[in-house]
Amino acid sequence: DAGVIQSPRHEVTEMGQEVTLRCKPISGHDYLFWYRQTMMRGLELLIYFNNNVPIDDSGMPEDRFSAKMPNASFSTLKIQPSEPRDSAVYFCASSSFPNQPQHFGDGTRLSIL
Amino acid sequence: SQQGEEDPQALSIQEGENATMNCSYKTSINNLQWYRQNSGRGLVHLILIRSNEREKHSGRLRVTLDTSKKSSSLLITASRAADTASYFCATAPNTGTASKLTFGTGTRLQVTL
């Protein structure tokens, strides 16, 4: 039973470049979440989807961040243009029902130089 | 501020000892969940306790919930080196259709041989 799959695992890029993070949720899970984890701010929810529809994007830091879920098996988080303060570990998680346990991917460690 | 605040921030014990971590939260909840995060990996769900439950067990884990004090504790008995990880509590809101979990700041547990 495959878990949540994220790619790439590591990304190093220069300031100003576009960054695209990818996520494949567990099949059958209707909820998909994007989080960001840093030492200073801990784990922050950026946005979540239900049945491919964005429900709450209040955690998205600014317009440079965007997220899409074109189908039930794929989601992207894009940062354009990227800045050094975007450096963090980005996690994708999915769940079957609201408020129930979430299954996390192993994250993408993003470094913006 | 974070809904869940764990205490202590860090804990170091020897193998075989028990480890207790505490979590406090601010608002009414539907349930409270505990997660483990190994270094460089995603969070893994450990146990969920509903707002009408006071205690729950799973293997070497024991979780208590006191809704009057808005607090929970996680006890790991007979700890092992493999229990070394960060532990997070997460609260599910008791409001309408909200599906967001709010994660605490975590407790770093070090179990030494």
Image (tube, coloured by chain):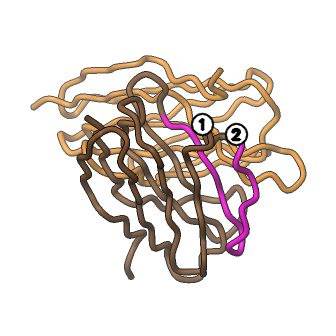
Chain colours: A brown, B orange
Q: Is residue A70 above or below residue B20?
A: below
User: x and y percent of residue B37 in the render?
Assistant: 36, 44
User: Which quadrant would residue A37 be assigned to in this image?
Assistant: top left
What residue sits 25% from the left and 37% below the top?
B84
The image quadrant of residue A19 is: bottom left
On the same chain: label 2 and label 1? Answer: no
Q: Is residue A47 above or below residue A43?
A: below
Q: Residues within 10 Å of mark 2 (few under 14, many from 20)?
A: few
What label does residue A61 carry, if any? 1
Chain at numbered mark 2: B
Instruction: Say which of B34 and A73 sits in front.
Output: A73
Identify the magenta region: A43-58
Marks 2,1: beta carbons within 8 A: no
For the question of whether residue B78 can be seen, the reply is no
The residue shown at (38%, 69%) is A5
Q: Nearer the viewer, residue B24 or B97?
A: B97
Magenta highlight: main SS: strand
The disc labelled 1 sits on which kind of residue? Pro
On the picture, is A11 further left or further right than A50? left
Identify the mark at residue A18; answer none if there is no mark: none
| Magenta segment includes A53 | yes
Residue denoted by label 2: B54
Three-letter amino acid code at disc 2?
A: Arg
User: Is B83 left or right of B45, judged from the image as shown?
Assistant: left
Q: Secondary structure at mark 1?
A: loop
Quadrant of the image containing the N terminus of chain A: bottom left
Residue B1, magenta (yes or no): no
Q: Is residue A69 visible?
A: yes
Q: Residue at x 25, y 35 (%)?
A: A113
